[in-house]
Image (cartoon, rainbow, N blue to C red):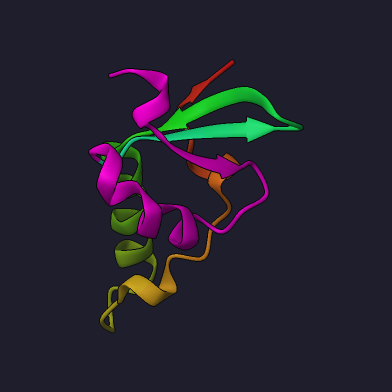
């Protein structure tokens, strides 16, 4: 996928905010730190965060609003 078609996010940004923009980029988010590429968050990375939250909060429903991790904590493909 061309880089200009990726959603962009700062490394300190809330994951939920970045995910909201990612729909137009097939769910891939290019993470920037001080304007330089620092990693990529994929749809699989987001699924893993949600699964972890679900395990932590297994006794109650976890909605999308609970996805409060920062983008840099979610990226598995870092430079």
Picture quadrant of residue 11: top right
Residue at the far right: name it: 34
- How many labels were placed on the picture? 0
Above-or-below relation of 56 to 39? below
The quarter in which the C terminus is drawn is top right
One can see residue 47 in this view: no
Q: Is residue 66 above or below residue 28?
A: below
Identity of the residue drawn at 45% across and 28% down: 40
**Vertical side of 34 occupied by 73: above or below:** below
The answer to whether residue 2 is left or right of residue 77 is left
Magenta segment boundaries in residue numbering: 1-26
Please name whichever residue, 69 or 8, is drawn nearer the observer in this view of the structure. 8
Q: Nearer the viewer, residue 24 or 49?
A: 24
Q: Residue 44, percent across and down? A: 26, 38
Residue 12, how many percent across, how many down?
Answer: 68, 49
Examine the structure image and report whether residue 29 is included in the region drawn in magenta. no
Q: Which residue lies at the image location 48% right of the left edge and 61% below the top edge?
A: 17
Could you tell me if residue 74 is visible in this image?
Answer: yes
* Quarter of the picture holding the N terminus: top left
């Amino acid at each position: 996928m061309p880089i200009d078609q990726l959603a962009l996010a700062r490394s300190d940004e809330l994951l939920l905010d970045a995910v909201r923009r990612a729909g137009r980029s097939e769910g891939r988010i290019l993470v920037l730190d001080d304007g330089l590429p620092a990693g990529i968050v994929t749809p699989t990375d987001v699924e893993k965060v949600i699964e972890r939250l679900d395990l932590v909060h297994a006794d109650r429903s976890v909605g999308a609003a609970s996805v409060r991790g920062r983008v840099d904590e979610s990226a598995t493909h870092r430079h």
